[in-house]
Image (tube, rainbow, N blue to C red):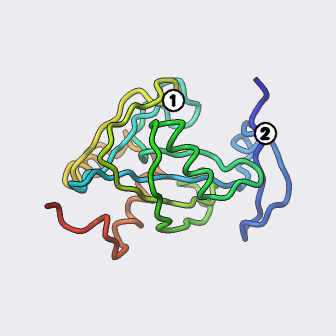
Amino acid sequence: MAEEILEVVDEANRVIGRATRREIHEKGLRHRSVHVLVFNPRGDLYLQKRSPTKDQHPDHWDTSAAGHSAPGETPLAAAQRELEEELGLTADLVHVLDCPACPETGWEFVSLFAARTDRSITFNREEISDGGFFSPQQVTRLLADEKEKVTPGFRLLYDRFQRLPHPFLKGRP
C-alpha cells in the first residue's frame, strides 16, 4: 500500500507543498485534519479508544472520528469519509469550529464537526479498540481524572467546543 500523501500548509493554512504522512509527523509540519463529535439523542458523546497499533496516541480516548484531509478534499468531505470509515455512519454534519495548528493538535489545522444520531455504531477494529457513548458528566470525569488516557487534541477541541452556545450542548431530556 502506498504511503499516504498529505498537503503541507503554512501558518495561514495555505497549501505550500505535499509530503508523506510520516515525514509530516516526524518534522512537525503543519497540515489539515478533521474531527467529528457524534452525539446520541440524550446528548451523550461517542468517544473512540484508538487502537494500540496507532503510531500517534495509541490506546488513548479521542473524538468520535478523526483523520487527515486528503489533497484537494474539502473539510466536510473528509469528515463524512472519516465518519463512514471509522464508525460506519452517515449523518448530517454541522461545522462547529476551526482550530489553528498547535502542538496539542500535532500541528494540524482542525475542522471540527458535530452530528446527532440514534443509529447503532459499528467501529472499525483496525483503527479503534473500543468505543461508547459517555454522558457529559462522564466526559468531564475522564478529562479530569484520567487526562493521560485522552489525546491532547481531544482535550483542546472539547474545551473549545464546550465554550460555544450550541444546541448539541443543551440539557438532556
Q: Quadrant of the C terminus?
A: bottom left
Residue underneath mark 1: 127
Disc 1 to disc 2, C-alpha distance: 19 Å
Badge 1 vs badge 2, beta-carbon distance below 8 Å: no
Q: Nearer the viewer, residue 53 or 6?
A: 6
Work out which residue is located at the far bottom of the displayed protein and give it: 165
Query: In the figure, is residue 23 to the left or right of 146?
Result: right
- Kindly indicate the quadrant of the structure image that contains residue 22: top right
Which mark is first along the chain, 2 or 1? 2
Q: Nearer the viewer, mark 1 or mark 2?
A: 1
Asked where in the image residue 120 lies, by quadrant, the reply is: top left
Residue at left offset 32%, top offset 53%? 39
Residue 170's spot in the image, x, y percent? 24, 68
Residue 172 lies, with reference to residue 28, above or below; the image says below
Please rate how many residues cluster around mark 1, counting C-alpha atoms within 10 Å: few if below 14, some from 14 to 19, many from 20: some
**Residue 142 picture location, percent across and down:** 27, 46
The type of residue carrying mark 1 is: Glu
Work out which residue is located at the far left of the displayed protein and give it: 173
In the image shown, does 28 or 45 lie closer to the viewer? 45
Q: Position of residue 84 (x, y in %)?
A: 51, 40
Q: Amino acid at mark 2?
A: Thr
Quadrant of the frame with the N terminus: top right
Q: Secondary structure at mark 2?
A: strand
> For the point 51% across and 52% down, which residue is it?
35
Q: Which mark is residue 20?
A: 2
Q: Secondary structure at mark 1?
A: loop
At 25% from the left and 51% from the top, the residue drawn is 44
Q: Position of residue 58 (x, y in %)?
A: 49, 31
Above or below 8: residue 27: above
